[in-house]
Amino acid sequence: MNARTLYPAERGNLRLSFEYFPPKNDEMETQLLQTVQDLSVFAPAFVTVTYGAGGSTKARSLTTVKRMIGEMGLENTAAHLTCVGASQAEVDAVIDEYVACGVRHFVALRGDPQGGIGSAYQPFPGGYENAAALVKALRRRGDFEISVSAYPEKHPESPDVAADIDMLKRKVDNGATRAITQFFFDNNDFERYLERVRRAAIQIPIVPGILPINSLTQVQKFAGLCGSKIPEAIISRLAHLEDRPAERFKEATHIAAEQMVDLARRGVRDFHVYTMNRSPLVTAVCDLVGYARATEAAQERVVALRTRTVAT
Ligand code: FAD
């Protein structure tokens, strides 16, 4: 047992998934593939690749998913898909392309309004009007695993949490099998939300989205846009370390690991980690929590992945 882990008692019982975004250039692609390989040692239950609203990353998302499934052998790759700003026919064509490259799990989303976060959302004429409609379309087209979004602190456009939970219920009634939350930092918010979700007779897994803080400034910006709070206690642990990267890294590792361990003590077993396509902080967090690293066989698979990728 590694004495430095925070959650040794139930080591191995916690499951992970990792989220990646499609790279914009060759350098970012190299970094992504390295990150995917590095994090493979934690044997994630699945990994996901985001998709720009309005299809802005369509080609790059497809290429990334294709490489991860076809070349790296990560059959458990889930494709995010948004329906904003696209006709049903366009969205259906993307679904078909994903299915052709082996996708069996979608993360079905509406996407942010085309005018940007904060502008009014307009369903696209002839498009799927929201995530619930997209889930329904996916369910009609195949026996996919379908994950959807959830918002413990309320979606910025939503009048209140009750409206959000109504929307989640519609997505579940249409066939969603799991919800992944927006990132949050106060576990009480998650627990309260989960209680309300269960009271609404929604039984699918609600997987907390964990965002390790690589850069406080960047995360403050994200949080402002998506309505997540960063508690003062976290800000004061990190704000004075902006110019001390080694200490900042250590503190950020502890913050995320402590959040996960506290959730685990409250009964959570599945965690979705927003990796930002970088492995060092996520690796440190998973090690500190006490996640088992790959067995010898899995290690060999990771080496094989690396060899195959270098060869391409
Ligand atoms: P929905 O589930 O349809 O709606 C979200 C909430 O907004 C609802 O609960 C509802 O209460 C409220 N709402 C919706 N429409 C209205 C309306 N017209 N008026 C009032 N309230 C309304 N974005 C991307 O572009 N690409 C991605 O790959 C991506 N991945 C994500 C993954 C996760 C796990 C999460 C949590 C978010 C992701 N997003 C992504 C962000 C997401 O697209 C935005 O939050 C978007 O604004 C809402 O999409 P949704 O699927 O959550 O919408």
Image (spheres, rainbow, N blue to C red):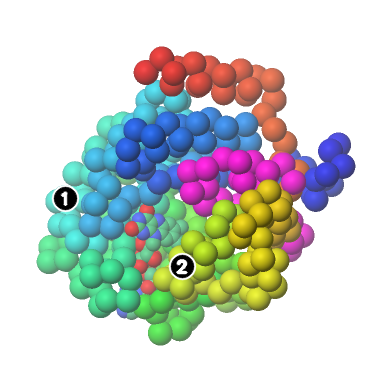
Q: Give residue 221's mark.
A: 2
Residue 81 x/y as whole percent:
32, 51
Residue at the spot 18% in from the left edge and 57% down from the top edge? 86
Q: Is residue 309 visible?
A: yes
Compared to residue 39, the image places residue 175 above or below, namely: below
Residue 114 sits in quarter:
bottom left
Look at discs 1 and 2 and give the one toward the viewer: 2
Quadrant housing the N terminus: top right
* Residue with the mark numbered 1: 90
Up the image or down, 306 lies above or below 213; here it is: above
Q: The residue tagged with tag 1: helix, strand or loop? A: helix
**Relative to residue 101, is residue 19 drawn left or right?**
right
Q: Which mark is residue 286?
A: none
Q: Which residues are magenta?
A: 260-288
Nearest the viewer among 183 and 270 is 183
Is residue 267 visible in the rendered image? The answer is: no
Where residue 133 appears, as percent x and y from the top left, is 28, 63
Q: Which sits in the foreground, 25 or 260? A: 25
